[in-house]
Image (cartoon, grey):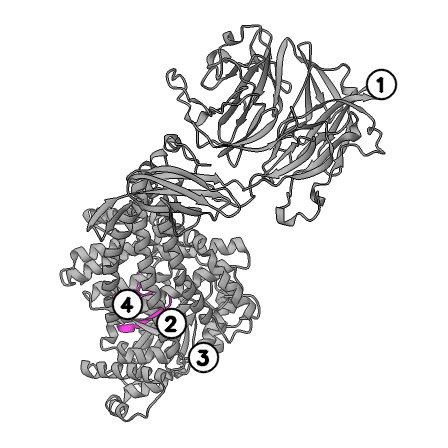
Amino acid sequence: MILLRRVLFYIFLVIYLFVCPYIILRTLGVTFRPGKQTIERTGIIYITTIPSGADIYLNSRLFSEKTPTIIPNLRPAAYRVRAVLPGHRSWEKTLPVRIGKATVVENMLLLPNQWTPLILDPEPVKETVPLIGVPFVLVRKGPQMQDVILFRQSPFPDEQTREENPPESLKPVPLAAPDSVYARMTVRDIHTIAQSSFLLVHGHLNDQETYLWITLKEPVEIRNITELFPERPDKIVWASVEPNTIFTMRDGVVNRLDLKEGAIYPQILTNIETLDAYKDSAFALTRDHHLVRWQGAQEELKLPLQDSKLDPGLFTSSKRWTLHVHSEKLFMFLSDDGTLLSNPFPVPVLEKNAKDFLFDKARRQLLIWTDKDIGILDYRKAPEENDLIKEPPLTWLKLKQKNIAHAEWINDGEQILWQTDRAVYLTDTMSLGQPRVEKIADIAKNSRIDYSEDSGALFYLDDKRRLTAVKILPVELTLPIPHLDLEFTVLQEETTP
Amino acid sequence: MKFAYSKHGLGRFEAGLQRMLEILPGAVSWMTLIGMIVLSILRPSWAAIIIIAFYLYWFFRLIYMTIFLALSYLRLSLEKDTDWMAQIRLVDHLDTSLKDFRKAAPLPLNKRLLRTLRYFDLKTLQRSRRRPPPSEEIFHLIIYPVVKEDRDILEPAVRSLKDQNFPNSRMLVVYALEERAEERIKETVFALEKKYKSDFLDVQVMVHPADRPGEARVKGANVTWAARQATAYLEKKNIPFENVIVSCFDADTVVSPSYFACLTYTYMITPHRTQSSYQPIPVYHNNIWDVPGFARVIECGASFFQLIEATNPEKLVTFSSHSMSFKALVDVDYWPVDMISDDSAIFWKAFIHYDGRYRVVPMYVTLSMDVAGSDQLWETARSVYKQKRRWAWGVENFPIVMRAFFKNRTISLYDKIRHSFKLFEGHVSWATWGFLLSIIGWLPGIFAHREYLTSVVYYNAPQVTHTIFRLGILSLIVSIIISLRLLPRSDKRTTLRRRIKHAFEWLMIPLILIIFSALPALDAQTRLMLGRHMEFWVTDKVRKKGSPS
């Protein structure tokens, strides 16, 4: 046994001494070309697609593995890479490969040969009410409460399993049943908050101003809270995590409504221009352009904008502002003429023409759109505080479109879904500069789209104002890898649709 | 060489050297772990390359060990039905037996293999010209240390002695009873002495006085006291020490019926029998089904380690319950009385005393002990952790052995390097590999910065490591098969359902590696490094009523 141990030990030692350096060199991208008797340093291409399983052609030669995959041992050069998946349009791009480097194409969305819309309701719809981060679609078909209809967003059926049209999972649920006392209430406004499962519906019932607090679940819960509204407010906000507190503002005076106690706490803030809620606090921009915070029984707290990058001097114009609080330290202000200010750098984000924006807190990226273009600002690249020179760049997609009305990220920020007043489009964010722009559908004029992260489906009103859905992303498990701050220059070349 | 195998009573220089050597294993383990973490943060590419080199090394070593685990298990299976008393008779009539081997009739392959092994045993003995005493003159001294073990632990052990196929009349059973033990325990021990006295040559209870000067509260002090008392007993009976084999067992040790016959045979055929220890394969079957799954897997791992080590007698060190020549025990002045790891320390003490002419002879026979634990999950986890930390405290031998090696001029340099490297590397890898394999190996990817994220290493390294781990599953499969085959088949509780469950319990290995292997070892080394010496901790051992013994 001892002899056997020794013999095997030396055999294993010799194998290790050969295998270990070989594998390490391969890992480093160093490869031996037996034909040329040379050792070369190489690079790789890492490519993942959605859906996965696409064939990869490298300079017209089929690669042995399907996506997601690593194409190893590539000499430094430009390679024509094509991803092909049956039923989908092929994706092609010229990618540069550098020594010791990985060229990364991550979560490349392969678009289907043709979109297959699913009409959820054959009757025309007046408008959609976008509910961000909530698994429902809300539509208004008429003026009354019974005409406000909820559709569950998921599970969204695959094309193969669509036996019913629409399937049971997507059947409509009226916000107020026909026999409900609120069924015939005339709806004037529907207030929503991103990530909140509550709605505040304002309307008239029997000639009386009525405010209903609605919990979006099945069955829908309706609570009449009209007694908390002695007069009609100019602005109503609440925090998504604090559904028992509503802040209302009228003529610069803020009231707090406690839904649990059914009580009004009047005049918690005065001389206010605009207002937002975050957690248990109300944040407001005063008319003399100071940011203040109200939190519980504490005194009104003036926040030191002067010490941050947001100088009150920036507000000294006749603009009307809206405040957006993303955290206790991150505020954004949008004016009626499209100036967007933000307290982290850069200040201002945009001098004019900003129509609206979305901030992704998890990825710390801002999506901003004007009438003609969409821009991305990555706060992860923000410089250190007090560094006045470097600023994270606001990168524009250069869409050359008109009437951009709304945009939002999909596929973990890899693509942007955006709409004009007539159509909805899809664009890759990784292809900054000259992006692939894919029209998905024509939509009813001035209607709003609604995208569901849960089901990967887009909901919109078609040209006949019917509520329609189309599956954009297959919901599949993908292994997340750390987000790459890649040098996007590698992907700026022309794409072949 | 005369050497005081102790960390106490040293001169200034010796004490300084001892302290420095105490720091060394823990410092190297911590430096390895912290160094790899820091490297993963600062230079993830370098860290990834080092990790690949380490994973490959681990993989080859794993395969190497798995081969010998399988071979060792095959040998154990082959020897399972050996009639050791018949083998003893062959040694008693050595010359005739060797002649008879040539006349033996054709046998099946396994029997032929065994016959060949026996033939080589006898031939080696004949060539050595170191004939053993006749088997009838060989006696066994069995010492059970007792401090808090109850009757349900002690009686199955003594019953297993009674059931030996070796004559009980040549077995002297000694209970090394701590004076500080509870009265209830003392009464149990004396009751057992009375009950079984007539079944053996004798059953004696040696009460070890509490807190004797120069002793720590350790098992070694207790069994040394008992062995010294037994010396007088043997002298009085005129039994030569060369003819006595002493087995120092844990109180829960249940030996297989052929253990003492196998031990006697092995003792007889070993040419330098009085300068050898005899190491059986420990299994932990007494309460295997009474403890949580993770504890079963850990103890299977301990048995596997001994199975693998058994194939390498040149580097084998005594572990847990084992046996040795009583003469050697007396020559080396018994077990250390101030060390916790008396089981391995006695080997090193003898190795140094005999200037390297001492070895451990593996025996392919099992003895069964309890899995440390109770019926509560957390209690079991606590007990297992503490037991493993106590095992890992064997690192306390390193500084003493090194000091002895520095002084000794007779032991060859090769032997010194071989043994000290194994001792050192064994403990450092024990404390670090679990972390490197389960956690630190993934850190370069987690701490990846911009530069590393765009490098080929970032994408290639996980592929390489995944492939290595996938290949490593082969070893896991072999381990599962052997562990299932090692389980006691006679035990009615070993149902098919339990076997399947046990197979899946092996999937906990990554977690077990960290919590019950690397962490206690690192804990022990850190304590030694910081000079926080451990007191002896008596493991809780619990068996449910009706557990087979």
Disc 2 marks a residue whose amino acid type is Tyr
How far, Cα to Cα, is label 1 from label 4? 96 Å
Looking at the rendered structure, the secondary structure element under dot 4 is loop
How far, Cα to Cα, is label 4 from label 3? 32 Å
For mark 1, what is the residue? A207
Q: Residue B330: say if magenta.
A: yes
Could you say which is closer to the camera, residue A246 or residue B226? Answer: A246
For mark 4, what is the residue? B312
Q: Residues within 10 Å of mark 4 (few under 14, many from 20)?
A: many
Looking at the rendered structure, the secondary structure element under dot 2 is helix
- Is residue B231 placed above or below A146 in the rendered structure? below
Q: Are marks 3 and 2 on the same chain?
A: yes
User: The numbered mark 2 sits on a residue in which chain?
Assistant: B
Looking at the rendered structure, the secondary structure element under dot 3 is helix
Q: Are marks 4 and 3 in contact (CB under 8 Å)?
A: no
Q: Which of pointers 3 and 2 indicates the residue nearer the eye?
A: 2
Q: Residues within 10 Å of mark 3 (few under 14, many from 20)?
A: some
How far, Cα to Cα, is label 3 from label 1? 100 Å
Q: Which residues are magenta?
A: B315-336
Disc 4 marks a residue whose amino acid type is Asn
How far, Cα to Cα, is label 4 from label 2? 14 Å
Q: Position of residue B250 (x, y in %)?
A: 41, 66
For mark 3, what is the residue? B162
How far, Cα to Cα, is label 3 from label 2? 27 Å
For mark 2, what is the residue? B73
